[in-house]
Image (tube, rainbow, N blue to C red):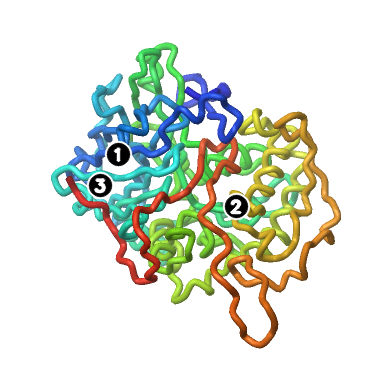
Amino acid sequence: MGVIVTIVIVLGTGVFLLLQPRTGSHAANDDAANPNCSLLVPANPLSAQGLATPYRFFATDDDQGQCHEVNPMQSAFVQAGVINPVTGKIFIYNPLVIDRESKPAVAPVVPKLPPNAIVAIWFGFNGTNLKLRGNDNSLNDGKCVNGVQGSIFGQFAYCNAPAFFNAANQAIRAGQLVPPPLGTARDGRACPSVRDFGVVDQDQSDNLTTMYLATKKGRLAQANAANVTTLPETRIITNASDNRLLDVAMDGALGCQPWTAPDLADPGQMVPALPLNELQAAAHQGAPVALVPNGDPMVLVNGQRNLNKLNAYRAGVNQPAVQDTQTASTKTYCTNLLNIGVKRIFLDAPFTRLSPSPDPAAANSLFTFLAQRFNATWGADIGLNCQGILGKKSPIKLQLDGDVTVDARLGNNDDNYNNGNNDDNGNHQKDNHGQGNGDQGNQNKDNNGKQGQGNQDHQQQDQNNHKDQQMPTMPAQDN
């Protein structure tokens, strides 16, 4: 098991520990964890019984080693959104994940769903590639999307998300569902959303706020007040993510509040969730709005841009489809990161310096964590290659104590290595006469720079050479 960081938090009436995994090269045992795992999706996944049936977790390839849900470098997570199509009210339910040969520490709560409820499910993963496997046609029944044919997203997948968002957006237009305003942060600016360039990184809108309880014997249970009382000395396993970074760390530092909805597994409790974050951002995020760009590692196929995969990902997080990859320009995305993201990081420094780091092995405060995260996103090795696309080095200069970022400052952004006349792939344009821009330069990078969020690389490990932009959206095949 990788090294973990513990933080005391309160859920309902219980007090317990939040585990935060160390990522990248910070933990000596990271390399021992198999980064490629599978989840067996239960039969009728959108039904109450399907939601209450534990998802089975196992290695995609046994030769790479085992996969165990209690290992924070491998843990997988599931989150469901439920909407009442009559009233527009949204509920959240977090299905349980357990090892294939294990049993839950406590049987999951069977949720009481509204009549004709529209249910969607999202998946998150602390490893590299999470593959969905079917049971009794469950992937087709759930309308599950793992990527496109031959190329999965990586850490992300979903089932029936477009139908859920269609119903939610209809309810918003009808005035039945009202996303709360973002509010005003301690810095005097609007509170950030998951589509704020002060929040996003190289692969925005991924992973979940779901938490699980783990016993000393390694058995899992849903994180609700009843189980906290029933199971002594439990730990919390989290899917450290963009959503958790916003809802817990950044909102906490800036005096903001995430949108929450009733938890169907924990009566009387309200919880944040990926679908709530996306709906609120769609309603209230001011321009420019951060949407998944064409260079996001999760939407590449063999390092190449792919329109179908880009749109498949966007459909799962309530973002508009595009007609061509250039409309989702990574160059524009990088420009906004530079002009907006950097300023927000330093504007919020008086508050984020006082907040704990999501990963003390990478940074000594939330401020320095965000600074080193920006540089990882900016770089060519593990990020969007904004450095190559814009021809500019990151303006953020990090001060390190060993491997830990202990301070950050704004440096001279004039130390550019070309004039920024690059295409959207980071290739320098030869001249202004339309001569070739060359092959795509930014290969499918790993995501070790997303330190402290429990995320590893997003290298797709595709087993084919599909470069066709018209590859069909998959669900993965049912077994």
**Eye-nearest disc, 2 or 1:** 2
Q: Position of residue 143 (x, y in %)?
A: 25, 55
405 relative position to 85: left or right: right
Question: Which kind of residue does numbered mark 2 sit on?
Answer: Gly
Q: Quadrant of residue 256?
A: top right
Question: Which kind of residue does numbered mark 1 sit on?
Answer: Leu
Question: Which kind of residue does numbered mark 3 sit on?
Answer: Pro
Task: Identify the residue at horizontal 52%, vertical 44% (top origin).
Answer: 243
Determine if residue 287 is in view: no
> What residue sits right under mark 2 in the picture?
383
Task: Identify the residue at horizontal 38%, vertical 53% (top origin).
Answer: 462
Determine if residue 63 is in view: yes
> What residue sits right under mark 3 in the picture?
114
364 relative position to 466: left or right: right
Helix, strand or loop at label 2? It is loop
**Eye-nearest disc, 2 or 3:** 2
Task: Identify the residue at horizontal 17%, vertical 42% (top origin).
Answer: 135
> What residue sits right under mark 1 in the picture?
39
In the image, 109 versus 66, the foreground residue is: 66
Mark 2 to mark 3: distance in Å? 42 Å
Query: How many marks can you see?
Result: 3
